Amino acid sequence: MRAMVRWVRADLRGHRGEAFFLLLATAGIIVSLLLAGALLSYAANPWQRIFTQSSGAHVWIQTKAGADARALGRLDGVQAVSGPFLTAPATAGVAGSTAAVQVRAVGAEPPGVARPLVTAGHWLSPGAVDEAVLESSLARALWVEPGDEVSVRVKDEAAHSLHIAGVADIAEPQYEPGEVPGVMWVSSTTFHLMAPNAPHEQVIGLRLTDPQDTDYVIQRAVTELGSDQISGISTWQDARAKAQGGDRLLGLLLGVFGVGALLAAALAGAGAVGTRILSSLRDISVLKAVGFTPAQVIRMFLVEYLALAVLGIVAGALLTEFLGDRLPGRAGEAVQLWQALPGHVWVPTGVVAGAIVLITATIASAAWRAGRVPPVPVARAAVPSSRRMSGTVRRALGLHLPPALVLGWRGAFQFPLRACAAVGRLAVPLLLITIALGTWTTLDRFENDPQEVGIVAALTARGDGIDDTSLRRLLTADPAVAGVYPGANVAALVPGQTGTITLRGLGTTGAPYPFAVAEGRAPDGPDEAIAGQGLLDLLGAKVGDWVRMTVGGSPQVLHIVGRGIEPEDSGRVISTSLNTLQEDAPALRPDFYALVLEPGADPSAVRDRIGEDAGGRLDIRESANPVGELTSVQPVIAGLVAVLALIGLAELSTTIAAGVRDRRRDLLALKAIGLTPRQIVAIIVAGTGFIALAAAVVGTCLGVLASQWLINLQGASSGIGSGIAQPPPVITLVVLAAAAVIGAVAVSVLPAVRAVRHRLADTLSDTM
């Protein structure tokens, strides 16, 4: 054991640079992966982020007015409470749109637990009796924003007009028409003015010491107050389940890139160990000659490189855990929130454990080769070190092609299995980088060409008290408006009455709406419709089928003639012309107008111009674009590209070391045939460049196919539909391949120069 430790120490001293680089690369990979996980958790789980930032309540209990709700704060397992707040059901209406709301009476300061996070406007002003703050999903449903007016009517009371002071996010179940009412906060004074005689209740939020005790605390609460005093309960699991679903693309990316980066790092480590063993054959033979067993030799290499890898992994994890929250900008905020998430410690533990297991397996397979080295050094000159020069190479030299290129090509691929292994290891990070670029390009497509991904209308307008003719004239007056299409959304029940979908009437028979069609064709006749992928999956239907649904108690039968890219409502939308809906409901009138703009028009500028011309009588909104929720993944993608570039650089160092080792045995022969040191350096550099070029071609081609498949698969599973993937531009792929080749050539120059400058005695010794 002492001899093994001494040999490992001596080997590390003799190769300080390689050891330090392996340690730094491993630590950098783990740091980057953990930061990527933190950023992705920050971006991909908005509900959890809101819950953490607002110190959300794990349980919300609605009780009768006379119940002692404050007693729930004294239950075992309850850490803090929010409320109790007086509450009453009401109806809020704006410009013909109505929504069920739960009005809560709060103070001038937001509560400390389950604190609403104001995203627009401000919290209730002290002393104001005509202000309200709306939960964000309710504000979107009513098409209101700070500064607007909303009419609120508590049951059996007169309607009150309230000024919207702000919009806030909460970690409670969001508003769903007919199922979950939206939340509206008003001051206690305003609440009593709105509901002086109407029956009211209380609602209290409980923040628990252990979130897993939710069921136990609910049972205790029911026992404490009595089941007859409790009228409603909602839990954090319910809210989280309803909020999740639209961010699986980010989770998929994290899984693919995380596993791929770890695999690439493990392959790079195995290649480095294998190259190191081949360059230490004489030392290994001497060790065996003095009495070391094959198991001891394997154990020495395994312990040495595994210790470096584990040290780098642990160092990277500790740096992220203790210093990550001090990083500037979004990265530090993401780590800080990530560390506050329940069970976050399992993610770093899993990453560390997975990295150790994977790297151990690959290093062990490479170290096993050291145990097979014979104890007596074999003169390599006695064994052919390379294959005979092929006829193609001889003909290329006869054509007076540059010897550096010809011999570099031969040196790179004279051992096909070894060359394929080197190309494969270097192609893995390039493949993942290409997938990352494909993701970035797809996000840019959503942002810059939304009409190609289902967002054809850039603006949606609603009028209050304006007749249809005047409204159309007002909307078409702007030269940037290419088309105005009336529309209406109605809720429809699917067959079996087990769920609701959105039935949309958009455009008319004479002026059909230009749907983004991914499969089939656009509807152009009566009873024809185009459906989203989510609806097709829900009904088990396909393009060409007839589907039956119920609208307001009346059946509606439509022929699906196409599948559209539908980013709204998880794709559970079926669209037809407004005329088709009016056949069964003649009283149906457009409740919005979709505005398609001329190419290159700025939606914000058009909205402002039309709003000024309308004198405030129009409510114009920009169409929701899902890319707004995904833009935060771009820093994650950039970080992953940096990680993969680091892994690629580590693999390049292994390829260069192998090339230099092989060329050392040929130095005398190359000099004997008249090649200058500069030409020999060019041969070594060219061999590395050819390996990098082959890896770039393989990695980018496979990366394009993989990115298309992954993104379209996610689009189909999320309900948006396949056909959203956009491959990276050809020029980007060319630049990526060129950067890989140029980088390989650049980093191989210095090792090649050092190899050529070796003395002849050193070169001769390498043949043993």
Image (cartoon, rainbow, N blue to C red):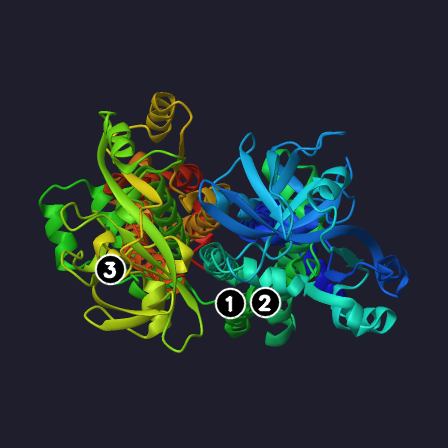
Residue 695: where, in percent of width, then height? 32, 53
Crowd around label 3: few <14 · some 14–19 · many ≥20 (10 Å): many
Closer to the chain start, of discs 2 and 1, is: 2
Position of the C terminus by quadrant: bottom left
The relative height of residue 646 versus residue 417 in the rendered view (above or below) is above
Labels 2, 1: front one: 2
Q: Is residue 667 left or right of residue 33?
A: left
Residue toward you, 38 or 754: 38
Residue found at x 87% / y 70%: 224
Labels 3, 2: front one: 3
* Amino acid at the residue labelled 1: Ala
The relative height of residue 344 versus residue 212 in the rendered view (above or below) is above
As drawn, the label of residue 366 is: 1
Residue that carries the numbered disc 2 in the rendered image: 360
Residue found at x 44% / y 70%: 499
Assign a secondary structure to mark 3.
strand
| Res. 256 in view | yes
Residue toward you, 262 or 400: 262
Residue that carries the numbered disc 3 in the rendered image: 530
